[in-house]
Amino acid sequence: MYNPKKISVDDSFNLYVDFENGEKRKVNLKSFIDGKSKVKEDLNLCKQAFIEDGIISWPNGISIDPEHVYNDGEIITNIEVASSFVSKIDNHYKGI
């Protein structure tokens, strides 16, 4: 149930997790990770998140149990995902 199949991080330190059951969750890593961590301060490092043995991890050894993201994260609907995608495209073309 808590198995993440895809993860991504945006420029606002939001972690998006697609779970195997088809549900999606979002957490802001700046408030979600306890204590002081480079993951909360370094966007490049933050975006290096990967899934290892069902756990969300970073190269510096920080990890998050996906159960916490599933239970405490904001539920993301397909409409919100599509809206975010369209917004990114709009912003891209505004700069051209």
Image: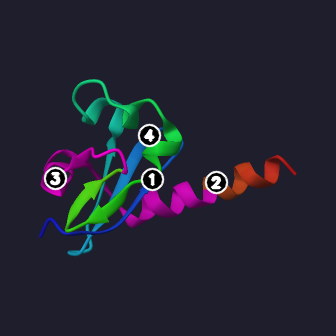
Q: Which residue is the site of mark 3?
A: 65
Q: Residue at x 28, y 46 (%)?
A: 61
Instruction: Give the CA distance from mark 3 to mark 1.
Output: 16 Å
Which type of secondary structure does the marked residue at label 4 adopt?
loop
**Three-letter code for the amino acid on which mark 3 is drawn:** Asp
Q: Is residue 44 above or below residue 3?
A: above
Q: Nearer the viewer, residue 85 or 60?
A: 60
Q: Position of residue 51 (x, y in %)?
A: 30, 64
Residue linked to disc 4: 13
Q: In this view of the protein, which residue sits in the foreground, 52 or 12? A: 52
Q: Which residue is mark 2?
A: 88
Q: Earlier in the sequence, mark 2 or mark 4?
A: 4
| Residue pointed to by mark 1 | 48
Label 3: element kind: loop
| Rendered-image quadrant of the N terminus | bottom left
Identify the residue shown where x is 21% and y is 50%.
69
On residue 74, the disc is none
Helix, strand or loop status at disc 2: helix
Circles 2 and 4 in contact, beta carbons < 8 Å = no
- Label 3 vs 2, first from the N-terminus: 3
Of badges 4 and 1, the one in the foreground is 1
Q: Residues within 10 Å of mark 2 (few under 14, many from 20)?
A: few
**Residue drawn at the location 50% of the way across and 48% of the way down:** 10
Q: Which of pointers 4 and 1 lies earlier in the amino acid sequence? A: 4
- The amino acid at mark 2 is Lys
